[in-house]
Amino acid sequence: MTIPLDPSSPALPGGLSVRGVGKRYGQNVVLDHIDLDVRPGEVVALLGENGAGKSTLSSIIAGLVRPDFGEMTWQGQPYAPTSPGDAIHHGVALIHQETKLLNDLSIAENVFLGHLPMRGGCIDRKTMEERAEVQLQRLGLNVPARRLVGSLRVAAKQQVEIAKALTLNARLLILDEPTAALGGEETDHLFAQIEALRAGGVSFIYISHRLEEIARIADRVAVLRDGRLVAQHDTAAVPVRVLVEQMVGRSVDRLFPALPAPRPEEVLRVEGLTSATGAFQDVSFEVRAGEIFGIAGIVGAGRTELVRAISGADPLKGGRVSLNGRALRLREPEDAIRAGVVLVPEDRKAQGVLLDGTIADNLTFANLDRLSRGGWVSPSRARAFAQRAIERLGVKGRIDDRAGSLSGGNQQKVVISKWISRDPRLFILDEPTRGIDVGARAAIYEVIADLAREGMAVIVVSSDLEEVLGLAHRVMVLARGRNMGVLDRSEASGVAVMELATA
């Protein structure tokens, strides 16, 4: 059932009430008279494409942004936070999709930053680390709290960010894509924590592009589009197709594209590959031209480490990687790139794009060897190259736009564009749609299918099982760093994959 919007309805006596809230930037209205209630002990899913206004609304509630009009009440009192600290003081905290952790501090120091436990005028490190590890274990992350955050993978950093918010004893938590980097087991741990907290009256605003999660965790659903609240549902049991169509404002017939048949020739052969760090052992498989090869498994199975090793980014202890029948010597990423192996990394902001550089900078820096003449690069030649590259993938932006100003989907297209321009033989994508909205995901999927149609061998690693199953011709399942089996598309299912992943 869709709840009619009634801006004249009274504010909620407990919990959060948002009435007529909006935000302008110049003449651009990014949030237009939003009405939203979040009751005590309730999870409200907030959905919408990138640019729909979710982040702006969340930032207003969390004190990062001041609204231009409208008002809010929290626990029956007027609420207008002037800063994130002010919001936290009132019991409202925002967990960002992009982690805000300090890499040179320990997990415990990050978790308790700003409210360090003290004893006798000194930091009580023992208590701090013990309390941090309790929260981490509840979320399924069993690592020492004294470990430096900079040594963690993206998924583990996300769990630390969540643990940090839980220690604040907040009464309203805004979770922005909390499971974007998590696998099934880690997601289950998080949901168990949410259930325990909501039983104690803690409220949640839950933002996610993984729509299949919404029915599991949310009580109600609110949908934003173009800065407006276009639908509210008094239940989370809403068909995914209905939510997608409300988000994008049009009918969505098919999310995953039709796949071309792979070609017979083998492009990649991996034989007995073993990590120098112990992340994976004795992994073997092959990928043909025009084939999309999926890699699935729970977080910590060694998926990211495996593809980083194949692309020359992580060291190997043993085994062989061959491309078109020729063994590769992979000492660094440049070796793989020159051989025709490219990687779109899981953390695009830290490893995929230069956020302060322009689109043109990002595209040309990865192709200097192809654009230069006698050691020099003509600016006009570089701009023409960049323009052709963004037109090919439909990047929404101008080549002089700063990459950091783009949506997640367009940033990902820029990363893919720079590598497509090199005409690689093997294209690896690690978490290709992490934090990307449904409309942009469909566009990325079509790009991946196009790579296969052009005859490239494609490897897709994803924590989103539906994504792997929808894209891949075959799926290899990793568990504890070992290849547990390769499933053909006809036999690959969620049950079959998880049986292997947890064997």
Image (tube, grey):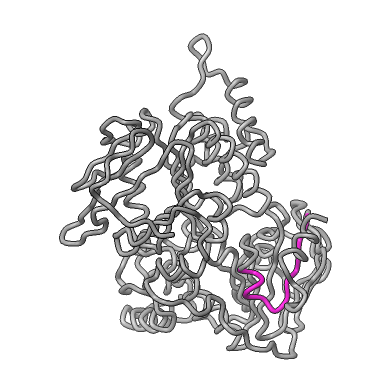
> Does the segment drawn in magenta span residue 468?
yes
Q: Is residue 35 left or right of residue 297?
A: left
Q: Position of residue 438 (x, y in %)?
A: 47, 68
Q: Is residue 143 visible?
A: yes
Q: Is residue 158 left or right of residue 251?
A: right
Compared with residue 456, is residue 202 higher up or lower down, i.e. above or below? above
* Number of numbered callouts drawn: 0
Residue at horizontal 19 percent and vertical 48 percent from the top: 68
Q: Position of residue 184 (x, y in %)?
A: 66, 54
Q: Position of residue 26 (x, y in %)?
A: 16, 58
**For this rendering, which residue is in front, 369 or 192?**
192
Q: Is residue 365 visible?
A: no
> Does the segment drawn in magenta span residue 129?
no
**For this rendering, which residue is in front, 267 or 370?**
267
Q: Quadrant of the N terminus?
A: bottom left
Q: Which residues are magenta?
A: 467-479
